Amino acid sequence: MLSAEAQYASSKATYRQVIGVEPGTLAPGAPIDRLSPSRLPVAIEIARARHPSVGVAMFGIDFAVLQVKINEGSLYPTATLTGTVQQTWESDLTKQALQQFNAFVLGQLSVPIYQGGGEYSLIRQAKETVGQKRIDLDTARDAVQAKVITTWAQLETTKAQILATQTQVASAEIALNGVREEARVGQRTTLDVLNAIIVLVQARTALVTAQHDRVVASYTLLAAVGELNLPKLGLNIPLYDPVVHYEQVRDAWAGVRIPDGR
């Protein structure tokens, strides 16, 4: 009893930490199977294309390719153009006022011939990095595929577990009713009735645990697919849009005020 009360208090504290408010009248959680793909091959295809870790790996390839081009730029010619304009007047007012105007334009073209070989080494290194990033992409896709298959199997297992525990609960209820009837006619003792009640309570506990595991497994599968997000869940929570913040600060060349006025 004391252990259950301690667990209850701990669960309330965890709810307050995660949700931000005290738990009120709570309803049992419902699985979100409807939001996940209906077939495993479709789930694998979506995960390999849209999972956030796959997207990170793809951006890593783009960055590595651009780094190759940047390093190759050290071998290209560079052109500079410098111009100056100067206008002066004679400072001695007793003399006739003189005005001079000078304009100067200088163009320079630099063609690298040999710079010690460091640039070639950096280019080769960047190209090897591109190959590494492509391997990372394949690894990320294989990892999310394995995760989807595992979570899919776990979800199917929890569904079967619910059916099994429901049968167990029904059997325990029938057994309890039979023991009670036998106890009424003196064929069973009070201890037998209590033992049957314990078996029924254990079966109902197993059913609740299986239902909990199915809810968790459905969310885990959606996360493995890469679609556990606010729009998919339909939560009434403002979604952070980095484009909005960029538009708010793009012209802030000076000053320390942030967009909310602080």
Image (tube, rainbow, N blue to C red):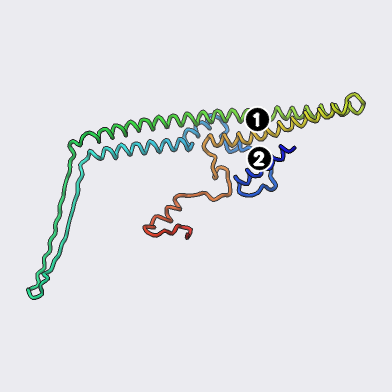
Residue labelled with disc 1: 159
Task: Give the structural element (helix, strand or loop) at label 2.
Answer: loop
Report the quarter where the N terminus lies: top right
Please identify the residue farthest to the front as the structure is shown.
Answer: 2
Residue found at x 74% / y 32%: 204
Against 120, residue 80 (above or below) is below
Q: Which residue is mark 2?
A: 29
Give the residue displayed 44% in from the left and 29% down from the top: 139
Where residue 115 appears, as percent x and y from the top left, is 20, 37
Q: Quadrant of residue 14?
A: top right
Q: Which residue type carries mark 2?
A: Gly
Say which amino acid is labelled 1. Lys
In this picture, residue 247 sits left or right of residue 27: left
Q: Residue furthest top?
A: 187
| 128 or 232, nearer to the observer | 128
Which residue appears farthest toward the bottom when viewing the image? 94
